[in-house]
Image (spheres, rainbow, N blue to C red):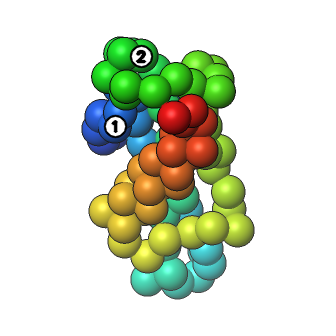
Amino acid sequence: MIPAMKAYYEGWEICTACWDELVDAHHDSLTQYCASGYAILVQPKTYAGGWLSKVRQTVPANKDMLFSDFNVAHVTIAAVLRSQIDALKVR
């Protein structure tokens, strides 16, 4: 995956990518977007607590979860990754 967008959250670098998925070859207007992403811990001491895991977090591409808007795809995948990161926090 070549990341198209990067963001940072609690010391993690979040990278997302998005691409066209042609839903119906007969109707170009039905083109939707598929997306995936990953997060890697680049600054572990940014968060004052600890981490249950420091392993790379991923959201794989899922053709059952298509988006009608490129930006919404990126925002949605990044939100899922932030939730995964939050679940790893130890206070």
- Mark 2 residue element: helix
Horizontal relation, residue 90 to residue 48: left or right: right
The mark closer to the camera, 1 or 2, is 2
Question: Residue 90 appears at what percent x and percent y?
Answer: 56, 33
User: How many marks are shown on the rendered structure?
Assistant: 2
Question: Residue 69 appears at what percent x and percent y?
Answer: 37, 71
Among numbered discs 1 and 2, the one appearing first in the sequence: 1
Q: Which residue is mark 2?
A: 44
Give 1 or 16, whichever is nearer the viewer.
16
Instruction: Choose top left, top right, bottom left or bottom right for residue 42.
Output: top left
Q: Are marks 1 and 2 in contact (CB under 8 Å)?
A: no
Q: Residue at x 37, y 67 (%)?
A: 72
Furthest toward the front, the residue is: 91
Question: Residue 36 appears at what percent x and percent y?
Answer: 54, 46
Which amino acid is tagged 2?
A: Pro
Q: Residue at x 46, y 47 (%)?
A: 82
Give 45 or 91, whichever is nearer the viewer.
91
With respect to residue 91, does 30 lie above or below?
A: below
Q: Is residue 19 visible from the viewing direction of this image?
A: no
Q: Residue at x 37, y 25 (%)?
A: 48
Which amino acid is tagged 1?
A: Tyr
Q: Is residue 57 visible from the viewing direction of this image?
A: yes
Give 61 or 56, whichever is nearer the viewer.
56
Question: Residue 78 appears at what percent x and percent y?
Answer: 42, 50
Horizontal relation, residue 6 to residue 87: left or right: left
Q: Which residue is mark 1?
A: 9
Label 2 Cα neighbours within 10 Å, binned few <14 / some 14-19 / many ≥20: some
With respect to residue 30, does 86 lie above or below?
A: above
- Mark 1 residue element: strand
Label 1 Cα neighbours within 10 Å, binned few <14 / some 14-19 / many ≥20: some
Instruction: Choose top left, top right, bottom left or bottom right for residue 4.
Output: top left
Q: Residue at x 44, y 56 (%)?
A: 79
